[in-house]
Amino acid sequence: MKKKVLSLLMASAMVLGLVACGSSEPAASNAPASNAPAASSQATDNGGAAAEDVALTFTWWGNQTRNERTQAALDLYSQQNAGVTFDTQPAEWNDYWTKLSTLAAGNSLPECLQMDYSYLEQYVSAELLVDLTPYVESGVLDVSKVDPGILESGSVDGKLYAICAGVNAPSLFYNKTLLDELGITLKDNMTLDEFKEVARQVYEKSGVKTDLPYAAGDNYLPFLLRAQGTNKLFNDTSLNVANAESLLPGFEIYETGTKEGWIIGADVHAELTSNSVEQSPLVYFSSEATQSWCGFFWSNQLSAMVAVAPEGMEIGITTWPSDDPKQSNFLKPSQFFSVSRDAGKNEEAAVKVINYMLNSVEANEILLGERGVPASSDVAAAISPLLDETAQVVTGYINDVVTPNCSPISPAIPDGANEVYNYYNELVDKILYGQITSEDAAKELFEKGNIIMNR
């Protein structure tokens, strides 16, 4: 089973796209902190001595803002813990999972790694992550200030494998400056019909198009199907839907936008880095034909989007549209921190770093909630006065817009699910090129999806 799961991880990582819980951007610095004092592997937060130095590899995906803040927080850890240094390895989303799959096959995973909810169960099944439960029991890892529901999201079969790095939610970013000029006001919790009407109005008045999620089936398809009460899209050996018609919402909006002309085409996306904040048509465009008034992202990505927006463009935030917004909306661990099974003798040292990222107020005064609202209630309260205007907007969005109007998160996906999502992405491409109808796409996904899950 372990070999089977690992091979599936490697295959899916080669082609999977996602509206990630962090955008892609070239790595910041891959060098360990040069000013870290030399000392010991078991040094504590007050610089206690121990037997030998420890060099840890810490890897994550993200945007440039995340890269810089994470590097600074780890530099501080090295200053506070003599002898602990880091080889930091940020990456783009797609490259990240491809690299991890290769390293896993070679038994050389980084000690500390960022993990995503959509991959958690698969990495646990492949025995690639350390069970953190014993470290919670011993007190090395303090989770006392984390909401039990958020903590549980990092568990599989009653064992804790991942610590929530922040809480976020699906978020529609939009060009508020443009919409104000056009006299269009967005409401929170729009239905799909209301969203499509806005898309038509923007296109008719300005020529600016709409960017729907692209190469992002693993987020968008289940979000839409949750409106039907389908909180779990997959069983272990089949799709958890009664028929092909149930899958239509995942395709119809693309077909409508293509026929009416207001959707950003696959040809535009072919020239961009998929699901990158920096290359989103919301902020990265050369004409009305390549510009979008909106982008489907995650709440914790707003700071990065604001940072790259053209001068004079105000970015707004609201919910993704759905036929039943309250049923579709959910709160999600933006990412997790995990320790790999290849940590070896450095396993406890790696856990201590995860504990630092979770509980250190000093560290989070640097990170400033870029990965989402901190999971520790004490940390969230401590850094709240330090948050900039954008971060305050995100916190208000999470607390006031999503939390009162959401449902529990769907279960982590099983083996095979990402292959189904990849096929969905291929079918969306065909719709955008006018090669297939939404009805036929739904039938093909239903048939092939069940075959994939039954392997």
Image (tube, rainbow, N blue to C red):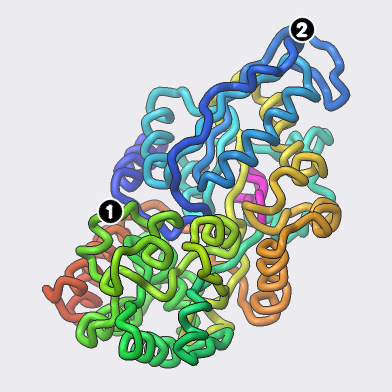
Disc 2 packing (10 Å; few <14; some 14–19; many ≥20) = few
Q: Residue at x 64, y 81 (%)?
A: 405
Magenta stretch bounds: 154-166
Under circle 2, the secondary element is loop
Disc 2 marks which amino acid?
Answer: Ala
Q: Residue 294 carries which label?
A: none
Q: Quadrant of residue 44?
A: top right
Above or below, 351 against 335 in this view is above
Answer whether residue 341 is visible to the viewer in this image: no
Q: Along the polypeptide, which appears first: circle 2 or circle 1?
A: 2
Q: Which residue is drawn at 33% across and 38% down?
A: 7
Q: In which quarter of the image is residue 439?
A: bottom left
Q: Residue at x 70, y 11 (%)?
A: 53
Under circle 1, the secondary element is loop
Task: Decide whether residue 161 is among the magenta residues.
Answer: yes
Answer whether residue 99 is visible to the viewer in this image: yes
Dominant secondary-structure state across the stretch colored magenta: strand
Q: Which residue is drawn at 47% across and 23% down?
A: 108
Residue mark closest to the camera, 2 vs 1: 2
Side of 391 where 254 appears, left or right: left
Give coordinates of residue 301: x percent, y percent: 55, 59
- Compare residues 320 and 268 and report the one nearer the observer: 268
Disc 2 versus disc 1: distance between alpha carbons? 50 Å
Task: Decide whether residue 390 is among the magenta residues.
Answer: no
Residue that badge 2 annotates: 51
Whether the residues at callouts 2 and 1 have beta carbons within 8 Å, the answer is no
Above or below, 63 against 177 in this view is above
Above or below, 105 against 142 in this view is above
Residue that badge 1 annotates: 455
Q: Which quarter of the rendering shows the N terminus?
A: top left
Give coordinates of residue 392: x percent, y percent: 72, 65
